[in-house]
Image (cartoon, rainbow, N blue to C red):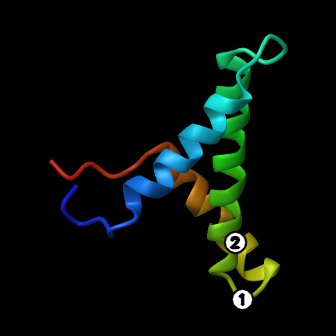
Amino acid sequence: MSDTDDKFYDRADEYIDLANKQISEKSNAADVSASFLYSASRFNAWISAANFKSGKEMAEVKDEIIHLKAHPPSFT
């Protein structure tokens, strides 16, 4: 990826290392993967919400955002 900052892969590697350390007899790779994806989703939701000035503003465009995520535009 030519448009990434210098620390892009370092950050990704740290998340992968943390996930790998959590794999054990009590938590298999699928369990850790599910937790990892859930946390990424929560973080991305928080990032998205932080761009709005209020909950009301976010609620006003909620349906539009969900529609765009479910049906992204085609650029081909």
Q: Please, what is the three-letter code of the amino acid marked with disc 1?
A: Lys
**Residue 30 placement (x, y as % from top left):** 66, 17
- Would you place residue 50 above or below residue 16 in this image? below
Give the structural element (helix, strand or loop) at label 2: helix
Q: CA distance from mark 2 to mark 1?
A: 9 Å
Residue at image location 70% in from the left, 22% down from the top: 23
**Residue 1 placement (x, y as % from top left):** 22, 55
Quarter occupied by residue 50? bottom right
Crowding at dot 2, Cα within 10 Å, few <14 / some 14-19 / many 20+, comes out as some
Crowding at dot 1, Cα within 10 Å, few <14 / some 14-19 / many 20+, comes out as few
Q: Residue furthest left?
A: 76
| Left or right of residue 68: residue 61 | right
Label 1 belongs to which residue?
Answer: 53
**Residue 67 placement (x, y as % from top left):** 54, 52
Residue contact at pointers 2 and 1, CB within 8 angstroms: no
- Would you place residue 67 above or below residue 62 in this image? above
Quarter occupied by residue 71? top left
Q: Between residues 14 and 74, which one lies in front from this camera angle?
A: 14
- Would you place residue 42 above or below residue 48 in this image? above
Residue at image location 62% in from the left, 80% down from the top: 51
Label 2 belongs to which residue?
Answer: 49
Q: Residue furthest right?
A: 26
